[in-house]
Image: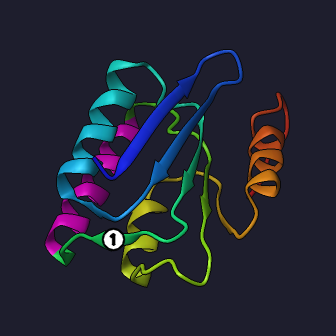
Amino acid sequence: MPADLKILRRERLVNISVRGTFNDADLDRFLRELVQGHALAFGKIVDLRGAAIGLSPSALMQHAGKLAAYASQGDVGPLALVVDATTRIDASVLASLAAAERPCRIFEDTIEAVDWLRTCLMPGVIVR
């Protein structure tokens, strides 16, 4: 499995680490785990450093639709993507991941990403 998901309930964070090629089945599994774990509203940090995203445009559209449906039912939580020069990701993938109405940013540093997510999750703070 090229990816790992950890739900940190006390911090209201989800940590996803992707290695190798991340595909359609991986994204489906993560969405299921987030829904079953009641963690959609949590902040999500997705570490894509060194990863390749192997999703077709049609799969991206399908997942964007799922995210939009989840967002219409409640909060999907902020998303922080961590990338580096070796990350192989198409811009359409980023657009798909950010499709839901939520704060979304791209970082090169994990600590900065976590700090930003914590700010997003503070009561009364609106981050765009």
Nearer to the camera, 116 or 2: 2
Q: Residue at x 42, y 78 (%)?
A: 89
Q: Can residue 86 be found in the magenta stretch?
A: no
Q: Quadrant of the C terminus?
A: bottom right
Q: Position of residue 38 (x, y in %)?
A: 43, 19
Left or right of residue 124, residue 1 in this image: left
Q: Can residue 67 be found in the magenta stretch?
A: yes
Can residue 71 be seen here? no
Can residue 103 be seen here? yes
> What range is drawn magenta here?
58-72
Q: Which residue is mark 1?
A: 53
Element at badge 1?
A: strand
User: Badge 1 local density, few (<14 within 10 Å), some, or many (20+)?
Assistant: some
Nearer to the camera, 20 or 42: 20
Q: Residue at x 84, y 42 (%)?
A: 119
Q: Residue at x 52, y 26 (%)?
A: 7
Q: Position of residue 45 (x, y in %)?
A: 60, 48
Q: Is residue 19 above or below residue 90?
A: above
Left or right of residue 53, residue 62 in this image: left
Q: Residue at x 52, y 34 (%)?
A: 75
Which residue is the extreme one toward the top? 10
* Number of marks present in the image shown: 1
Left or right of residue 125, residue 72 in this image: left
Q: Position of residue 25 (x, y in %)?
A: 18, 50
Q: Is residue 17 above or below residue 37?
A: below
Q: What is the magenta segment's predominant secondary structure?
A: helix
**Label 1 amino acid?**
Ile
Give the quarter of the image for residue 110.
bottom right
